[in-house]
Amino acid sequence: MTDSAAPMASTTQSSFGTLPDGTKISLYLLKNTLGTEMAVTNLGGVIVSLKTSDRSGVFEDIVLGYDSLSGYLKAPSFFGALVGRYGNRIAKGKFTLDGNTYTLARNNGENHLHGGLKGFDKVVWNATPAVSENGASLKLTYVSKDMEEGYPGTLDVEVTYTLTNKNELKIEYNATTDKKTIINLTNHTYFNLSGNTKRDILNEVLSVSASKYIPVDKTLIPTGEIESVSGTPFDFTSPTVIGSRINDDHPQLLAGKGYDHCWVFDKNDESLSLGATLYDPVSGRYMEMYTTEPGTQVYTGNFLDGTITGKYNTVYKQRYAICLETQHFPDSPNQPNFPPVVLKPGDVYKTQTIYKFSTK
């Protein structure tokens, strides 16, 4: 008698519905050897669900989203989506490159947000699932044509999600261009570690490896300054309950209706390093975020207002999730003191972010 084979990671593909133009959309289910599973659709590269274990071994979904395709076709909330060409805001929808001014959609008040009217969150990606000894993966590719949404250059993009057998969600971003352009890719997953969205995230505990953050104006565009978090509600250099200061009478909290700011990591290179941790004391779920990026936008679901009903028939109310969007800084094309976001022909855009799940 021989031992049974060790469990293998797996991927399966199923239908996720049809777009109004007849395009068929797929859902890919990735499972690792530890029982963690993630569902991703090729529409926008959206992470539809991510089921991880609590400290008692119960697997539940820790991301916000919809039960069906129809939810993702409504007004944008960017649940779980790949965001590009430029994640975050660009002031007044304009930037200048080599003396040429480019005009983008103003889809967030007077500003440009998350790639425009049809950003990467709304396009259909080519998807290739795979299984290896490391886990289950899904490679997504898309060609963004020159001047799509106003951005110069034909951009070849490849994003690979891997659900590793170490309980990591690894996201690898790669892109090349045939003309000088700007790029800032990220993922817009809304996390709630309670499992199946039982409550808001105000009692979850956050730490961010950043002693500085970027203040914004009333339209959430950076002022250009980079300020210390010391002595402010933005100090998460040690683990802090998210809700402990979120309602403080601080002008930056009032501007964002909570946290909707970019934190600047305490590193001066592109090494993969710990950027943040998130912990839910009730379920015991613990998440570590590692990234090569210089910052992360921390968004506490301030604009969720109870008008959206998501999975598990849950009404998504204010602060029912937190986003940790690894990225370069908002409005960098118009901020000369921020790290550059220009991609030139012959160069490769390459970043990586890992969300690692455990319990304690």
Image (spheres, rainbow, N blue to C red):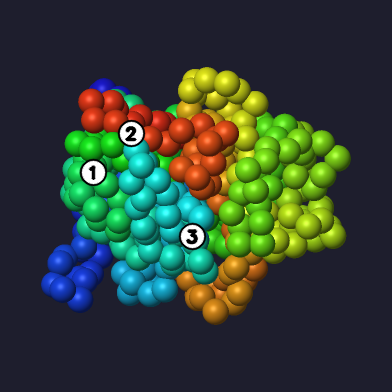
Quadrant in the picture for the C terminus: top right
| Quadrant in the rendering for residue 256 | bottom right
- Kindly identify which residue carries mark 1: 153
Viewer-proximal residue among 310 and 182:
182
Q: In this view, does 352 lie above or below 13?
A: above
Viewer-proximal residue among 61 and 184:
184
Residue 67: x and y in percent read: 39, 69
- Residue 92: give its label: 3
- Earlier along the polypeptide chain: callout 3 or callout 1? 3
Secondary structure, mark 2, is strand
Which residue is pictured at 52% across the width and 20% down the height?
269
Quick check: can you spot residue 174? no
- Kindly identify which residue carries mark 2: 343
Which residue is pictured at 46% across the width and 43% down the height?
333
Which amino acid, mark 3? Lys
Q: Would you say the residues marked 1 and 2 are in contact, meaning their CB atoms lie under 8 Å apart? A: yes
Which amino acid, mark 1? Gly
Residue 300: x and y in percent read: 63, 57
Viewer-proximal residue among 186 and 359:
186
Which residue is pictured at 26% across the width and 23% down the height?
2
